[in-house]
C-alpha cells in the first residue's frame, strides 16, 4: 500500500485580481520508507507542495486534489480536525526558514518539549519531566548541538540560523514521523554538519522506516540516497521516475540540463545555497506564462509543436511532460 497518493493537486493564489495557479495538476505518490527527491529552480513550487501536504497554507491559497490519500486514508473525506490529527501525528516538516518558523516567545526547551510524542506528556504532572529533559538533550546531541543547557534557555532570535535549523530538525524527528518533509534542511549549515544531518536522516530512514521527501538545490546531496526524483518547473511536475533512470536516461530536456549544470561535489563545499540555473533565461512569472510548453522559450530542443501544452506521458515507469523526449532508444 502506498504511504502517500495524491492526484491532480492544484494550488491557487486567490488574493489577486486574477487567481494564479502556482502549482498545477501534480501527481505525487510514495511508498512507506521511500526517499523521494523534489528538485527544481527557485520559484518552481516545491515549498508550496510541501506546505500543502502538511496543511499550513493560509486562506489566501486554495488547495484542491482529486485524490489525497495518506496511509490508506482519504484525507479529502474527513473532518478538518481528524485530518489535522493524522497529519500532526505522522508527518513532520523541516521548514526552509527555520528561525521564522520557531516561536519567538518561547525558549528552545519549551518548544522541543512540546514536540515530544504524547507518551512523554501523559501521567502525573511532572512525573515524566526528567524523562523529557533527557530526551530533549539526546535530540540536540543527535543534531550536533553539544551545549544543550545554553541552547535550552535561549530564544530563537539569540541563535544563529544554522542552530535554529538544527533545532527544527530535532523537533521534526522527535515524533519519529512516518513521513518527514525536509525543505532544504541543510542550507544554513556548514558542510560538515550538513553531512552529519543527511547521515542522521538516512539512518532514521533505514532504521525507523521513515519516508523522506527531500527538497533541495544540491543535487549531489540527494542522488546518492533517493529512490525516486521529481523535477518541478514553473508549477508543474515535468519529470518523475527512479533516481537511476533520471541519472542515466532523463526524458525531459530540463532534467538533463539540471544535471548537466550541477557542479562537482568537490566544488560544492559550503555552496549549499547555490541556486539551480539549468538553462539560459529565467523561470517565467506565473502571471506571464508562455503559450504551450512552459519551458518553450528556454528549451534548446523546442519545435513548432511545442506551442501545444505537453500532457504527462508515462513510459516504463518514467513520467514526463515533453513532445520530444530524450533517450527514447533505451526504452525500445
Ligand atoms: N506568499 C506568497 N505570495 C505570493 N506568491 C508566492 C508566495 N509564496 C510563493 N509564491 C509564489 O509561488 C511560486 C512557488 O513558490 P515556492 O516557494 O513553492 O517555490 P520553491 O520552488 O520552493 O522555490 P525556492 O527553491 O526558492 O524555495 C513562486 O512563483 C512564488 O513566487
Ligand atoms: S515540449 Fe518542446 S519546448 Fe517543451 S521541453 Fe519538450 S522539446 Fe522543449
Ligand atoms: Mg522553497
Image (cartoon, rainbow, N blue to C red):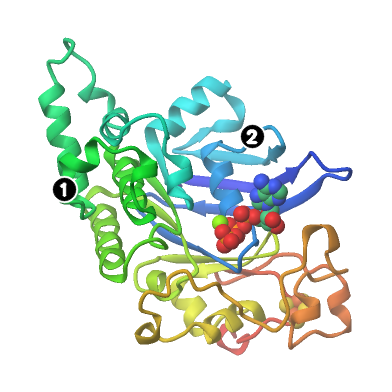
The quadrant holding residue 102 is top left
Q: Is residue 12 left or right of residue 104?
A: right
Crowd around label 1: few <14 · some 14–19 · many ≥20 (10 Å): few
Residue 26 image position (x, y, % from top left): 65, 54
User: In this picture, is 230 found above or below 277?
Assistant: above
Where residue 74 is drawn, which disc sits there? none
Q: Nearer the viewer, residue 25 or 39?
A: 39
Q: Residue furthest front?
A: 158
Q: Quadrant of ligand 3?
A: bottom right
Q: Looking at the picture, tell me which residue is in the foreground, 241 or 171.
A: 171
Q: What number is the disc on residue 58? A: 2
Q: Which residue is mark 1?
A: 147
* Residue 170 seen in render: yes
Q: Residue at x 52, y 27 (%)?
A: 83
x and y percentages locating residue 273 in the rendered image: 47, 69
In the rendered image, the vertical position of residue 294 relative to residue 110, given as above or below = below
- Asked which secondary structure carries label 2, the reply is loop
Amino acid at each position: 500500500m502506498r504511504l502517500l497518493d495524491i492526484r491532480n493537486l492544484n494550488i491557487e493564489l486567490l488574493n489577486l485580481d486574477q487567481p494564479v495557479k502556482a502549482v498545477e495538476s501534480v501527481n505525487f505518490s510514495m511508498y512507506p520508507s521511500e526517499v523521494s527527491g523534489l528538485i527544481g529552480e527557485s520559484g518552481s513550487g516545491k515549498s508550496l507542495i510541501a506546505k500543502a501536504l502538511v496543511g499550513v497554507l493560509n486562506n489566501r491559497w486554495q488547495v484542491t486534489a482529486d485524490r489525497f490519500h495518506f496511509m490508506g486514508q482519504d484525507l479529502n473525506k474527513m473532518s478538518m480536525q481528524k485530518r489535522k490529527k493524522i497529519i500532526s501525528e505522522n508527518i513532520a516538516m523541516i521548514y526552509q526558514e527555520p528561525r521564522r518558523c520557531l516561536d519567538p516567545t518561547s525558549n528552545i526547551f519549551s518548544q522541543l518539549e512540546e514536540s515530544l510524542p504524547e507518551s512523554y506528556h501523559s501521567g502525573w504532572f511532572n512525573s515524566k519531566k526528567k524523562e523529557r529533559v533527557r530526551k530533549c538533550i539526546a535530540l540536540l546531541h543527535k543534531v550536533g548541538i553539544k551545549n544543550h543547557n545554553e541552547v535550552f534557555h535561549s530564544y530563537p532570535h539569540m541563535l544563529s540560523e544554522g542552530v535554529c535549523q538544527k533545532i527544527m530538525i530535532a523537533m521534526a524527528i522527535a515524533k519519529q514521523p512516518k513521513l518527514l518533509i525536509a525543505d532544504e534542511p541543510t542550507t544554513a549549515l556548514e558542510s560538515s554538519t550538513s553531512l552529519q544531518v543527511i547521515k542522521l536522516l538516512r539512518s532514521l530512514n533505514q532504521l525507523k522506516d521513515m519516508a523522506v521527501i527531500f527538497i533541495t538545490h544540491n543535487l549531489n546531496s540527494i542522488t546518492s540516497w533517493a529512490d525516486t526524483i521529481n523535477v518541478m518547473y514553473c508549477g508543474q511536475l515535468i519529470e518523475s521516475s527512479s533516481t537511476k533512470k533520471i541519472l542515466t536516461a532523463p526524458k525531459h530536456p530540463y532534467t538533463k540540463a539540471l544535471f548537466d549544470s550541477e557542479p562537482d561535489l568537490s566544488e560544492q563545499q559550503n555552496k549549499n545555497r547555490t541556486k539551480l540555473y539549468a538553462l539560459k533565461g529565467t523561470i517565467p512569472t506565473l502571471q506571464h506564462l508562455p503559450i504551450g510548453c512552459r519551458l518553450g522559450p528556454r528549451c534548446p530542443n523546442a519545435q513548432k509543436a511545442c506551442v501545444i501544452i505537453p500532457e504527462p506521458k508515462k513510459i516504463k515507469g518514467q513520467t514526463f511532460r515533453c513532445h520530444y523526449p530524450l533517450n527514447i532508444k533505451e526504452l525500445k
